Each structure stands twice: as structure tokens, then as C-alpha cells.
Amino acid sequence: MKMLSVSDCYRSLHHGLIPAVPVPFGTSGEIAQSAQEQYIAYMAGQPIAGVAVWAHTGRGLLLTEQQRIQVLHSWRDGLPSDKILIAGVGCNRQSTAIVTDALDSALRMATTAIESGAQALLAYPPTHLGIPLTSMHWPSSTIKS
């Protein structure tokens, strides 16, 4: 998948359907890769603008980094090039209770997402920290466009 400018991304997504896709798991607790690939093949033929991986329905904040990369690569490889791949990024409430750690976690996830082929990000605010959203500041210099 190619990198998109913000305006290209907007045009691709405007009035489009972007489902948040689930991650199928087998009884052993591992990602059911065959089921994942079948679902990707099905969704690739649907009239969607793209998909959102690592979203709540896909257990994004609860997956290991290896699982997240596996999921993102599967979707990147299986979606047609005209579909947008969006990745949810944030921090797991069990992993941090410190604001700077939460931001670092989200930025690491964002970097992994972009390096793995995501074209846009869906940011989860660390609401479990009890900080008003108006007081959160993302250091814009840490994410390259």
C-alpha cells in the first residue's frame, strides 16, 4: 500500500464505510490465521473505503506487538490497493498509569503501524488516567507525515 497525503486520505474515506474488523482466535488462544485470511478475502470484495485494524472490535490494545503486526500485514497484503488501512493506537490500561508512558506507548504503536503499512491512525485517548482530554498534548514533532 502506498503512502497517502492527508487530502488523498480524506478523499478516499469521505462518505466511505470503514468497518472496524475483528480478530478471530482459535481455542488455543492464537490468531486463527485461516479464518482471518478468509474474512479478509471476503471484505476485500465489499464496497468499503478501507478497514480499521487494532480497533476495539479487533482487541487492538490487548494484542501483543507480534499479533498486531501479524494482523496488520494480513490486511495490508489482502486488501486491494484502493482501500485505506487504518490502525488504532493507544495504551493498554493494564500496562501504564503514567501519562508519559501512555504517550510513549501510543507513539510506539503508531510507529509500528506506519512501518507495517497503515495509511492512517485512529488514536485512543488514555481516558483511564482520568485526565481531561483538553489537557492532553501530542508532541507533533514525534510523528512524521
Image: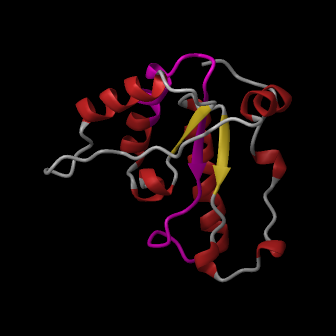
Q: Is residue 87 magenta?
A: yes
Residue 59 locus on image (x, y percent): 42, 55
Of the pair 129 and 85, the residue shown nearer to us: 85
Please determine whether, in this image, residue 36 is positioned above or below residue 102. above
Residue shown at 52%/72% (left/top)? 96
Report the residue that reaches farthest toward the bottom: 130
The image quadrant of residue 119 is: top right
Residue shown at 76%/30% (left/top)? 9
Is residue 142 at all visible to an observer of this figure?
A: yes
Please determine whether, in this image, residue 113 is positioned above or below residue 81. below
Horizontal side, residue 99 vs residue 45: left or right: right
How did the renderer colour the structure? secondary structure
Q: Quadrant of the C terminus?
A: top right
Residue 15 locus on image (x, y percent): 74, 37
Q: Quadrant of the N terminus?
A: top right
Q: Is residue 13 magenta?
A: no
Report the residue that reaches farthest toward the left: 28
Is residue 98 at all visible to an observer of this figure?
A: no
Of the pair 38 and 138, the residue shown nearer to us: 38
Q: Which residues are magenta?
A: 72-98
